[in-house]
């Protein structure tokens, strides 16, 4: 599904778009399941284990910001996480030993879906090596107007930036404090069924959805089978149950990679949106 040039582009730029990975029927099913979840969210008025809600969510006008760990809540989401084309593509980018990590579905409703401030996933979950990537399955056409994921090409080869504020982790980079070429940001655009892939150290974020069209992005994280989380493995059987290819190992590969621990934890737990509430400044929320 991907060429040698795509692999070279991913390693150089820290991201890749692959069109037409999911079929129209698979996308239709994922959309229908997502709509059922949004219907169910009418029953809740606060964040739950499943739902992260927009501030203006109500029973009459449900506004879900995120479905948490969707792969644990519906077989269609589970199947998407283990989709053979995704596993094949990641095998070429990361290597034959591959593990699923976790996932989320970020829904950006029309007219106001929330921004995600600039960050590196690596700041949230450092590992013994950085052969980790996030895959964004586009459930809608992603266009410049509906809050696309934006990346800073090549930033995965640079430092890990400070994601702290007020002495605790906040999950966002303070744009004012850093000399980062944010003007070089590239929106990752594609039609429904395409996937984006970004390296765990690639700086990325997104502006609110100011358009009349939703932007639902099903984001799954993957890692090399020999990448072990520096925050620990609480349950090795559960960890190994997520292997997608290659044998289990208890020998982590140690790479010379920059690390900052996400500690002390963010005062607002639950989701990246909650973590980022304690950031000193917000930038992307005001843009778009
Ligand atoms: O939904 C988006 O546009 C960005 C999501 C993201 O980076 C995250 O949730 O970590």
Image (spheres, grey):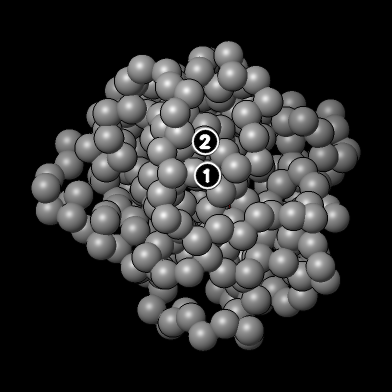
Report if residue 74 is visible in the image. no
Which residue is located at x 44 percent, y 61 percent?
A: 202
Q: Which residue is at the far left?
A: 4
Q: Where is residue 189 in the image (x, y as percent from the top left)?
A: 35, 58
Q: Which of 210 and 150 is in front in this view?
A: 150
Q: Which of 44 and 111 is in front in this view?
A: 44
Residue 45 shown left or right of residue 219 in the figure? right
**Relative to 125, does residue 110 appear above or below in the rendering?**
below
Q: What element carries label 2?
A: loop
The residue identified by callout 2 is: 228
**Relative to 280, does residue 122 appear above or below in the rendering?**
above
Res. 82 image quadrant: top left
Who comes first in sequence, dot 1 or dot 2? Answer: 1
Q: Is mark 1 on a helix, strand or loop?
A: loop
Residue 235 shown left or right of residue 51 in the figure? left
Query: Which disc, if any, is residue 127?
Result: 1
Residue 66 shown left or right of residue 141 in the figure? right
């Amino acid at each position: 599904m991907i060429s040698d040039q795509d692999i070279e582009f991913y390693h150089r730029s820290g991201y890749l778009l692959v069109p037409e990975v999911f079929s129209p029927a698979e996308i239709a099913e994922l959309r229908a399941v997502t709509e059922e979840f949004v219907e169910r969210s009418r029953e809740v008025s606060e964040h739950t284990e499943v739902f992260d809600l927009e501030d203006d969510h109500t029973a009459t006008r449900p506004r879900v910001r995120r479905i948490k760990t969707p792969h644990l809540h519906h077989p269609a989401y589970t199947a998407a996480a283990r989709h053979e084309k995704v596993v094949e593509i990641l095998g070429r980018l990361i290597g034959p030993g591959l593990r699923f990590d976790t996932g989320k579905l970020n829904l950006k409703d029309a007219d106001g879906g929330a921004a995600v401030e600039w960050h590196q996933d690596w700041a949230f979950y450092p590992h013994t090596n950085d052969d980790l990537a996030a895959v964004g399955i586009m459930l809608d056409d992603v266009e410049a107007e509906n809050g696309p994921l934006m990346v800073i090409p090549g930033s995965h080869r640079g430092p890990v930036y400070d994601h702290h504020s007020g002495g605790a982790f906040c999950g966002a980079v303070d744009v004012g404090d850093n000399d980062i070429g944010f003007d070089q940001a590239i929106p990752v655009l594609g039609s429904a069924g395409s996937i984006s892939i970004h390296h765990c150290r690639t700086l990325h974020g997104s502006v609110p959805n100011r358009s009349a069209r939703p932007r639902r992005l099903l984001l799954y994280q993957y890692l090399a089978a020999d990448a072990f989380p520096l925050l620990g493995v609480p349950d090795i059987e559960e960890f190994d149950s997520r292997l997608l290819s290659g044998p289990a190992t208890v020998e982590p590969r140690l790479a010379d990679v920059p690390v900052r621990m996400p500690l002390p934890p963010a005062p607002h737990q639950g989701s990246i949106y909650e973590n980022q509430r304690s950031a000193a400044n917000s930038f992307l929320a005001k843009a778009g």
